[in-house]
Image: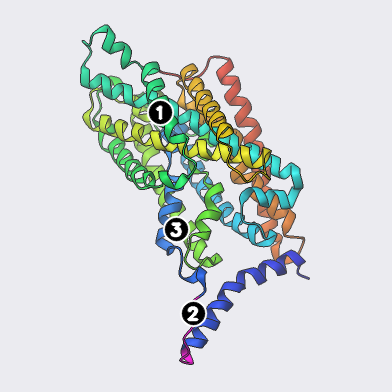
């Protein structure tokens, strides 16, 4: 016998198809039918593919060669494919959860399933993931722009010039001078134009690493005997890095709602194509970088190249420039999560609180980036601790809560249990091992 939740899901998934059928019947009868609003707004499947691919192919892709170093070449390749498949499934699972719960946001789904505890957990992990992204983006600014400036002024620059193009000074000036003012925007739409530039830049960086990698000087290359490694000790830390690169689940409902006809089948097409494109791009980036630098692969693969490599310097400039607008997007998420959780009923804009929260966020991320320049550690920690909860644990847990115990959903429930347990295991082990490595001074930091 079907559970009540399963019946509700079936009804919800058929609503749009029924509306479309009625519209077509009216057209056949020669009557003028006014299309519902949801059939005329939004974009098509390829617009959704573009948006979702852009959400996946973010700054985390720069650390994927490092993930192969940590996990081993063959184990890392398998992990990339598995995480891509799981990401495809859990993104669609969130939309199913939204339909079954009747909620429209990720946090509201957790709230409907687990009450205030669920809302608090979703808010905390969304905040920590976005803040981890802010820290990573500040580190990337310090990794990229100073190297480009150094290549322009040359090694014989005066002490004053050398001071102003040093990593700490450049990071402080650019973060406070560009990213901080952009972070004060109230409307995230003002930064939307940067998404297209970010996607083009990511493609350029992937191509640059693939083209320039084989031609780097021999002294920069890693040990060729360590290319075809099977399994290394950093397996769980690597899952954290890969998860950071793939997680986009908090955007899935927004992208689903942006479709002109938001049905489950159309969204499935979007997720399948987007994750396939993303997995291919990630495989190209990770293999082309790791096979050249092997045991010397750094958390930011661009740091492995020489500072006078023109093509890589253009890639560094593009990547660093993207961070100016990407960091404010993460600050927006952190600020909105905090204000929604602590001041849910307040409707009027509080300028003082807005400025104080934004300032605290940007300064905190800046301090972290000045304390450590190990991008790999930040990706491991943010990915292992927060991304695994958002991508694996929460979607599966909500589905188990909402789906009932009908036989029709038994295979899906079994998969959800496996996904949830996988998320807990990776979150605990990856976080513990990353912190232990940092405490022991085993970090591969190169400044």
Distance CA(mark 1)–CA(mark 2): 50 Å
How crowded pointer 2 is (Cα within 10 Å; few <14, some 14-19, many 20+) is rated as few
Determine the image quadrant of residue 129.
top right
Taking the spot 23% from the left edge, 33% from the top edge, the residue there is: 311
According to the picture, the residue beneath numbered tag 3 turns out to be 48
Taking the spot 53% from the left edge, 14% from the top edge, the residue there is: 441
Instruction: Say which of 445 and 202 sits in front.
Output: 202
Numbered circle sitting on residue 140: 1
In this picture, residue 56 sits left or right of residue 264: left
Taking the spot 62% from the left edge, 60% from the top edge, the residue there is: 96
Q: Tell me where residue 386 appears, x and y as whole percent.
A: 60, 36
Determine the image quadrant of residue 10.
bottom right
User: Which stretch appears magenta?
Assistant: 28-35
How crowded pointer 3 is (Cα within 10 Å; few <14, some 14-19, many 20+) is rated as many
Instruction: Say which of 122 and 374 sits in front.
Output: 122
Lower sequence index among marks 1 and 2: 2
Residue 329 seen anywhere in this rendered image of the structure: yes
Quadrant for the N terminus in the image: bottom right
Determine the image quadrant of residue 206.
top left
SS at mark 2 in the image: loop
| 30 in the magenta segment | yes
| 7 in the magenta segment | no
According to the picture, the residue beneath numbered tag 2 turns out to be 34
379 shown above or below 400: above
Distance CA(mark 2)–CA(mark 3): 25 Å
Q: Tell me where residue 326 appears, x and y as whole percent.
A: 43, 38
378 shown above or below 78: above
Quadrant for the C terminus in the image: top left
């Amino acid at each position: 016998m079907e559970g009540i939740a399963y019946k509700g899901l079936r009804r919800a998934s058929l609503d749009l198809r029924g509306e479309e059928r009625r519209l077509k019947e009216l057209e056949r009868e020669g009557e003028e039918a006014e299309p519902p609003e949801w059939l005329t707004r939004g974009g098509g499947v390829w617009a959704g593919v573009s948006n979702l691919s852009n959400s996946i192919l973010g700054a985390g892709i720069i650390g994927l060669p490092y993930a192969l170093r940590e996990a081993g070449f063959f184990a890392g390749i398998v992990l990339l494919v598995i995480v891509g498949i799981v990401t495809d499934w859990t993104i669609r699972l969130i939309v199913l959860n939204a339909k079954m719960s009747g909620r429209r946001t990720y946090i509201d789904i957790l709230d409907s399933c687990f009450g205030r505890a669920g809302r608090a957990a979703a808010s905390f992990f969304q905040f920590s993931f976005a803040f981890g992204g802010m820290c990573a983006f500040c580190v990337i600014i310090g990794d990229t722009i100073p190297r480009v400036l150094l290549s322009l002024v040359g090694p014989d620059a005066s002490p004053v010039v050398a001071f102003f193009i040093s990593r700490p000074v450049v990071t402080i000036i650019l973060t406070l001078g560009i990213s901080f003012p952009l972070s004060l925007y109230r409307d995230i739409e003002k930064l939307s134009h940067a998404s297209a530039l970010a996607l083009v830049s990511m493609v350029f960086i992937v191509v640059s690493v693939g083209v320039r990698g084989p031609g780097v000087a021999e002294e920069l290359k890693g040990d060729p005997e360590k290319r075809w490694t099977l399994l290394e000790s950093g397996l769980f830390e690597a899952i954290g890095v890969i998860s950071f690169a793939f997680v986009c689940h908090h955007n899935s409902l927004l992208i689903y709602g942006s479709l002109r006809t938001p049905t489950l089948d159309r969204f499935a097409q979007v997720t399948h194509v987007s994750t396939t494109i993303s997995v291919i791009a990630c495989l190209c980036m990770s293999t082309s970088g790791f096979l050249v630098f092997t045991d010397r692969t750094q958390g930011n693969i661009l740091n492995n190249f020489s500072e006078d490599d023109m093509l890589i310097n253009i890639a560094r400039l593009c990547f660093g420039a993207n961070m100016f607008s990407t960091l404010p997007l993460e600050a927006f998420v952190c600020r909105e999560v905090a204000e929604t959780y602590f001041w849910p009923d307040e409707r009027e804009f509080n300028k003082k609180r807005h400025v104080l929260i934004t300032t605290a966020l940007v300064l905190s991320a800046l301090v972290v980036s000045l304390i450590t320049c190990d991008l790999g550690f930040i990706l491991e920690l943010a990915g292992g601790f927060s991304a695994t909860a958002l991508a694996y644990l929460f979607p599966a847990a909500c589905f188990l809560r909402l789906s009932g115990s009908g036989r029709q959903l038994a295979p899906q429930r079994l998969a959800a249990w496996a996904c949830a347990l996988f998320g807990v295991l990776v979150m605990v082990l990856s976080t513990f091992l990353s912190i232990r490595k940092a405490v022991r001074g085993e970090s591969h930091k190169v400044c």
